[in-house]
Image (cartoon, rainbow, N blue to C red):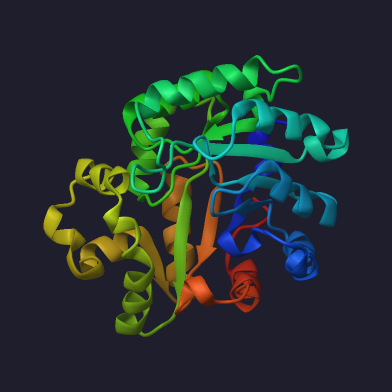
Amino acid sequence: MALDTALGTIGIWSGALRVDGPERLGEVGEAARELEELGYGTLWIGGSPGVHQAAHLLEATERVTVGTSILSIWTYEAADVAAQYAALAPALRERFVLGLGVSHGKLAERYARPYSAMQTYLDGLDGAPVPLPASQRLLAALGPKMLELARDRAAGAVPYLVTPEHTAQARERLGAGAVLAPELKIVLDTDPARARATAREFLSLYLALPNYTNNLLRLGFEEADFADGGSDRLVDALFALGDGNAVRKRVDEFLAAGADHLAVQAVVPDQRNAPLPRAQWRELADILPLKG
């Protein structure tokens, strides 16, 4: 099955799907099975997960694709990633997609020459005893050079913190044959001020990371847009805010701009300490085009 078909139209992105210890295996496995039954095509694990963490979700489900979004090349060695992929049962391997990226200088001590480092990392995946094939890997590409590498050395791109305008530019750079699967944050709240406050609370972390702000500057935003958690213009561009109709409109804008798949992230107040947002996932399942 082609990767764009395997991903489906809509997936769920969540750092809460990452399991670091046995105490949450049951809870997260149950949530993964519900997401599969709701019709989401892919479960994206946030927070630089490893293949071993994707394995938990693969084992808990039967059909859904499971991806890392994103695995940091500074945290996991290419040889180890390929070996863990090879150790998966063949049926689970078929449902796995490796989303990988160069992370950020503030988060990775070894960060240096990210483009060259990614090339070397892909060489390592290709040269492993059991290669992790280009057809099952996507790069967290934002700028032109990394997008071209995603086109040439992977199945496509999984951009994070982007707009429909970036999606259109990425599609042009990737060409028609590559997979484009951006992420979109959603706040289901019909009070505009409260929805923006929730978005700003979550966005503030990312506005301290130059890889993201540099990309936003390329898209026409200004330094002033990054102050105080983000201007209204920036927040409204990066999030889908409001009721079901407003959210569906934003999702359709990404798909019309050239996305094959959209990884949606339900954002709630105090997101980093929140449980799995299962009520929001259920509500989104009734709003979004899960069946294509």
Quadrant showing the N terminus: top right
Horizontal and vertical percent position of residue 91: 86, 37
Q: Position of residue 101 (x, y in %)?
A: 48, 37
Residue 227 at least partly seen: yes
Position of 11 with respect to 162 (left or right) is right
Between 146 and 120, the residue placed more toward the observer is 120
User: Nearest the camera: 177 or 121?
Assistant: 121
> Residue 110, relative to residue 149: is it above or below?
below
Seen in the picture, residue 202 relative to 139 is either above or below; the reply is below
Residue 154: give x, y in percent of width and height: 56, 25
106 relative to 184, above or below: above
Residue at (68% x, 31% y) in the render: 80
Question: What residue is drawn where x is 34% and y is 61%?
Answer: 205
Q: Residue furthest front?
A: 109
Q: Quadrant of residue 7?
A: top right
Describe residue 128's horizontal placement relative to residue 208 as left or right: right
- Name the quadrant containing residue 193: bottom left
